[in-house]
Image (cartoon, rainbow, N blue to C red):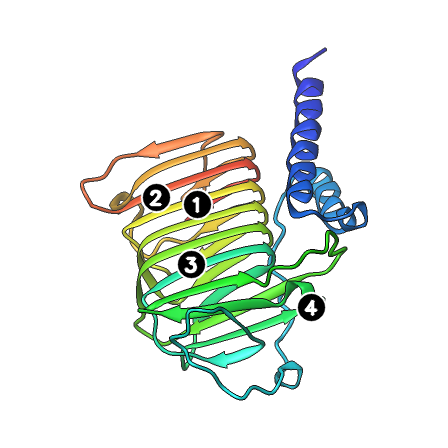
Amino acid sequence: MNKKIFLIILTVITIFCIVFGTFHHLGISTKGYSSVSSSIRNGLRHGKFNFHFDDDDFDEDDADDWDGFDFEDDDPKTFDSETISEFRELDVNLKVGGIKIERGNKWEIKSKYSNSLLKPAYSLKNGKLSITQAANNKRSVGNNKCNIVITVPFGTELEKLTIDVNVGAVELSGFDIKKGSIDTNVGAIEITNMGFKDLDLDSDVGAISIELVEPLENYNMTINSDLGGIVVDEKNEKRHFSQKSSSDKHLRIDTNVGGIEVK
């Protein structure tokens, strides 16, 4: 068996194991495989694994009417669209859902979901915003999806950012963080115009793209991809890239199946 055939078989087995394990963990029925499996087939065909965030616009008419509640309440509250208080720490944990954080005119969160089982919830206490999906006992969410958009004002710098998504993409732009960790099982990660001191990016199946706000030499970097090319400053680096810097900025990126681009 030559090397090319072996790599193809290894790729298919790896993807199957990751996707099967993800859906088994989520409790999604076999009907829910179609959207992800279709993306994987296209990725194999074109050599890309993106799984991008769905850019459907949020319609204010879709939001429910709310009577208001205490932002400092310990219990998470479900939401469609809410203006919220300022926060300095963000923790996101989603089973199925894309998350986008971008610069806006105010502190606000919006969600759009195709199934009530995926309706997200949040709590905001002591400057920490936590977003999850409401617990449910049903085993199947089929091909449904959920997207969340958070807007933060100009000049925002978060102390800590933690995002963990099983199936869904992550897009970040227009703010700064001190320390961040982003992990997706199936989904792309795309970052532009975001300063940071310490950042970890990890995707099992999905591409990772980051546009640095400072010159490349200002970062300590360690980048690895099991199956997927690495491009740093428009140069191909195969499966591994690392560099040391005298600065205090650190960037670590890992993918199992998916390309990585740093620019």
Mark 4 / mark 3, whichever is N-terminal: 3
Mark carried by residue 241 = none
Is mark 4 in CB contact (under 8 Å) with mark 2?
no
Q: Nearer the viewer, mark 1 or mark 4?
A: 4
Q: Residues within 10 Å of mark 3 (few under 14, many from 20)?
A: some
Q: Amino acid at mark 2?
A: Leu
Mark carried by residue 251 = 2
Q: Name the foreground residue: 125 vs 154.
A: 125
Residue 48's quadrant in the figure?
top right
For the residues marked 1 and 2, what is the alpha-carbon distance in whole angstroms?
A: 8 Å
Residue receiving disc 4: 116
Q: Nearer the viewer, mark 2 or mark 3?
A: 3
Mark 1 / mark 4, whichever is N-terminal: 4
The residue drawn where x is 75% and y is 41% is 41
Mark 1 / mark 2, whichever is N-terminal: 1
Q: Residues within 10 Å of mark 2 (few under 14, many from 20)?
A: some
Quick check: 128 above or below 181?
below
Mark 3 / mark 1, whichever is N-terminal: 3
Under circle 2, the secondary element is: strand
Tell me the quadrant of the picture where the N terminus can be found: top right
Under circle 1, the secondary element is: strand
Residue receiving disc 3: 91
Quick check: 243 above or below 249?
above
Q: Position of residue 17 (x, y in %)?
A: 67, 32
Q: Nearer the viewer, mark 3 or mark 1?
A: 3
Q: Amino acid at mark 4?
A: Ser
Q: Residues within 10 Å of mark 4 (few under 14, many from 20)?
A: few
For the residues marked 4 and 3, what is the alpha-carbon distance in whole angstroms?
A: 22 Å
Residue receiving disc 1: 201
- Res. 209 visible in picture: yes
